[in-house]
Image (tube, rainbow, N blue to C red):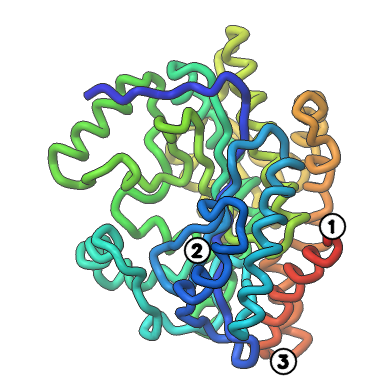
């Protein structure tokens, strides 16, 4: 099977930001995406900036093809300028986190469409449980033959992205003890979870052919890996991050992804052999980051050396400074260090729960307020 990779001449960016719709009074989820679309899309210069998702409680904000992190944030801010007033008219707020702390899956409605109905018919209980939201970051890669080595090497920094973005500690009213419950929920779907570590594009083509032949998938988009090639776009798509509650955290995470992919691709193009780890180390790092977040001690390399993730992150940010300067995102990359200082979203949510004697409505309030405050600051 041949899969054409439409290589990107520039290291372009694209961001997909999933947001839940919550009631302004009860703070529970509301299945109002269709009504929100009807009001918001006519106000958008490009209606394709707003997408539907699996459930009617969700909307996805999508950028165009951007050159810098700043461009991507400006793009999303323009979309928010249309979506937020439309949500206001419906008594809705936008909620950015990996999970909702108390909503029940039994009350959620499926978005119309054969693709979504077939997913639920196949996956049953696990599919119906997917009250999860994330952020996807596309980075353009010029050469097909560099895609799989870069993707495999990028897994070394999977736990950093997972821990920084973790925002799903509470599920169905119970603190799970995990920083990211979303990470472990999502991997229950067929073809989701960690990617296979292929080094050659032909290996990926053979895998995809097997999946299609045996009926595991009907379309390449149904390969739901946490990091995957998007051949039709000429990008590597990073889907590791939990939902994000504010534009500052989002800009920081997008900058980190952009710099990591471009750094690895540049090194590979220069003849360097990129570092990788055995799949069992990658899998363990995913679990540790999901469980412990920024307190995780992660495995660094194939030699099984370990280190506190925040210590390794500090060195990583210094190493990527020249890359960020070249990509025009120095300030955004530097702001990654602000997340551990003020606490990642999972930590902020737990802090609110502790201060309010476990009031989960107050937790939702706090997540909504972070997005509102960020919009006002940029406004």
Question: Where residue 156 sits in the image (x, y, percent)?
Answer: 57, 35
Label 2 crowd (10 A; few <14 / some 14-19 / many >=20): many
Seen in the image, is 20 located left or right of residue 85? left
Label 1 to label 3, Cα distance in Å?
24 Å
Instruction: Say which mark, if any, is on residue 48.
Output: none
Residue 46 in the image: state x and y as whole percent. 57, 51
Residue 175 quadrant: bottom right
Real-space CA distance between mark 2 and mark 3, rounded to the nearest whole angstrom: 24 Å
Name the disc covering residue 357, or none. 3
Give me the residue at 50% from left, 33% from top: 236
Identify which residue, 53 or 96, lies in the foreground.
53
Picture quarter with the N terminus: top left
**Residue 278 pos. (x, y %):** 46, 32
**Disc on res. 182:** 2
Label whose residue precedes the other's in the sequence (2 or 3): 2
Q: Is residue 134 visible?
A: no
Find disc 1 in the rendering and name its residue. 341
Name the residue located 23 percent from the left edge and 46 percent from the top edge: 217
Coordinates of residue 208 in the picture (x, y in percent) = 26, 34
| Drawn side of residue 376 relative to residue 255, left or right | right
Give neighbour class at mark 1: few <14, some 14-19, many 20+ (Cα, 10 Å). Answer: few
**Mark 1 falls on what kind of element?**
helix
Q: Which tag, 1 or 3, sits closer to the chain's start?
A: 1
Question: Measuring 31% from the left and 20% from the top, which residue is drawn there?
Answer: 202
Position of residue 262 relative to residue 186, above or below, is above
Q: Earlier in the sequence, mark 2 or mark 1?
A: 2
Q: Nearer the viewer, residue 165 or 120?
A: 120
């Amino acid at each position: 099977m041949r899969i054409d990779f439409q290589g990107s001449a520039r290291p372009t960016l694209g961001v997909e930001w999933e947001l839940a719709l919550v009631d302004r009074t009860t703070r529970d989820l509301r299945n109002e995406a269709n009504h929100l679309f009807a009001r918001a899309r006519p106000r958008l210069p490009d209606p394709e900036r707003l997408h539907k998702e699996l459930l009617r409680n969700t909307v996805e904000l999508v950028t165009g093809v951007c050159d810098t992190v700043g461009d991507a944030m400006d793009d999303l801010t323009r979309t928010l300028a249309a979506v937020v007033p439309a949500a206001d008219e419906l008594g809705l707020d936008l909620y950015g986190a990996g999970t909702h702390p108390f909503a029940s899956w039994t009350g959620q409605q499926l978005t119309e469409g054969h693709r979504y109905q077939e997913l639920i018919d196949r996956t049953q209980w696990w599919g119906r449980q997917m009250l999860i939201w994330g952020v996807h970051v596309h980075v353009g890669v010029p050469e097909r033959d560099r895609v799989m080595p870069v993707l495999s090497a990028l897994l070394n920094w999977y736990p950093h992205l997972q821990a920084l973005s973790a925002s799903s500690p509470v599920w169905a009213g119970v603190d799970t003890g995990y920083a990211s419950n979303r990470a472990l929920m999502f991997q229950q779907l067929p073809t989701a979870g960690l990617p296979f570590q292929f080094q050659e594009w032909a290996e990926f083509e053979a895998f995809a052919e097997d999946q299609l032949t045996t009926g595991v998938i009907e379309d390449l988009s149904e390969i739901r890996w946490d990091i995957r090639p998007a051949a039709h776009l000429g990008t590597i798509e990073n889907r590791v991050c939990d939902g994000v509650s504010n534009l500052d955290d989002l800009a920081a995470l997008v900058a980190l992804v952009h710099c990591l992919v471009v750094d690895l691709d540049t090194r590979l193009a220069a003849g360097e052999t990129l570092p990788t780890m055995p799949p069992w180390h990658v899998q363990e790092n995913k679990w540790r980051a999901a469980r412990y977040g920024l307190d995780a001690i992660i495995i660094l390399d194939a030699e099984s050396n370990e280190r506190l993730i925040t210590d390794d992150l500090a060195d990583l940010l210094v190493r990527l400074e020249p890359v960020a300067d070249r990509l025009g995102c120095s300030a955004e990359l530097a702001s990654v260090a602000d997340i551990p200082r003020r606490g990642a979203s999972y930590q902020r949510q737990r802090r609110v729960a502790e201060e309010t004697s476990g009031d989960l409505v107050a937790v939702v309030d706090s997540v909504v307020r972070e997005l509102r405050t960020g919009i006002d600051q940029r406004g």
